[in-house]
Image: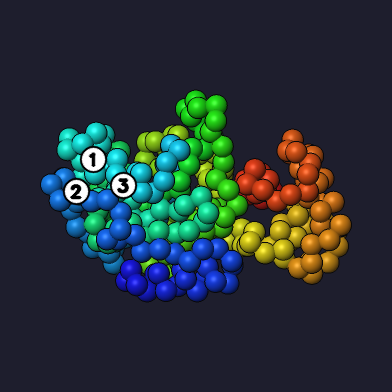
Amino acid sequence: MEQTLLKSLTKASKTLGIPEPHDGRGHLATNNNGAKWKTRNVEKLQGLVMHQELGWGSVEGVARYHTGPSSHLHDGGVESISYSWAIRRDGQIVLCNDLDKATWSQGYKGRAGDENAEFISVMFEGMFKGEKVTDPKAGEPNDKQLLSGMVLWQVCKTEWDWDSDDLYGHYHFGKPACPGDTLQVMIDAIRSNREKLVYDFSTVTGRQQALKDLGYYAMEVDGKWGPGSKGALVRFQTEHHLEPDGIWGPNTEAAMWKALKNA
């Protein structure tokens, strides 16, 4: 199944202009003496959970930490990085583990079942603003990461025939800081508006349609980003207390998801 997913992700990445996915298995740090993951039935996975790194490192750095002697996951470390997937700052999607490994990603919330066995996880590199995140340098996931996150979600959603409310954030499992405000808005919008939110923000057409449906764009949705489209975006940014620069960035996209959710 891993190769099938990587093939689908490679095809999507070439179409959308993001880095091709990377199979990190055999390349990321491991610990043969670390605590071992349980195995799970891949066919019975129930959804995807998004996480943030909550740091300033890299996928490789997180793998070294999780498998190292100072790991908070287990004394002496664990056998591998505790995520199924990761997304780098440049948007590259990384397969971190075999998907039948039930990594300790979600923790245990006291719910029925085993959330680590039932859900696959993806970690976004970076420190993102959100509840209980006190670092003043915390920022936002960038456009490439947001796009790659959506690509990974759509590929997994198709593979397992999931519904839109099978997408989760770590905050659903008792970690309010994770994966941060921007990703939480996107996740909540997708979960609560499965039929309504059909916008593909990676395309001009999708952006124009969202602005039109919110009443900011009165022209034809033609897939050409011109002065009319930019002016509509500036009006949206102004009314939502964003910098009115006409640039479709992560803060604007998060506000757009929220506006569509509440429309």
Q: Relative to 108, does residue 43 appear above or below in the rendering? A: below
Q: Relative to 63, does residue 85 appear above or below in the rendering? A: below
Q: Secondary structure at mark 3?
A: helix
Q: Nearer the viewer, residue 102 or 198?
A: 102
**For the point 55% across and 30% down, which residue is it?**
137
Query: For the residue carrying disc 2, how many other residues have a C-alpha within 10 Å: few (<14), some (14-19), or many (20+)?
Result: some
Q: Secondary structure at mark 1?
A: loop
The answer to whether the residues at label 1 and label 2 have Cβ atoms under 8 Å apart is: yes
Q: Position of residue 239 (x, y in %)?
A: 78, 39
* Precedes in sequence: disc 2 or disc 3: 2
What residue is shown with label 1? 68
* Precedes in sequence: disc 3 or disc 1: 3
**For the point 25% across and 36% down, which residue is it?**
71
What residue is shown with label 2? 31
Q: Amino acid at mark 2?
A: Asn
Q: Is residue 84 visible?
A: yes
Q: Position of residue 31 (x, y in %)?
A: 19, 48
Which disc is residue 63 wearing? 3
Where, by quadrant of the figure, is residue 144 drawn? bottom right
- The quadrant of the picture occupied by the N terminus is bottom left
Q: Nearer the viewer, residue 6 or 62?
A: 62
**Colour scheme in the image?**
rainbow
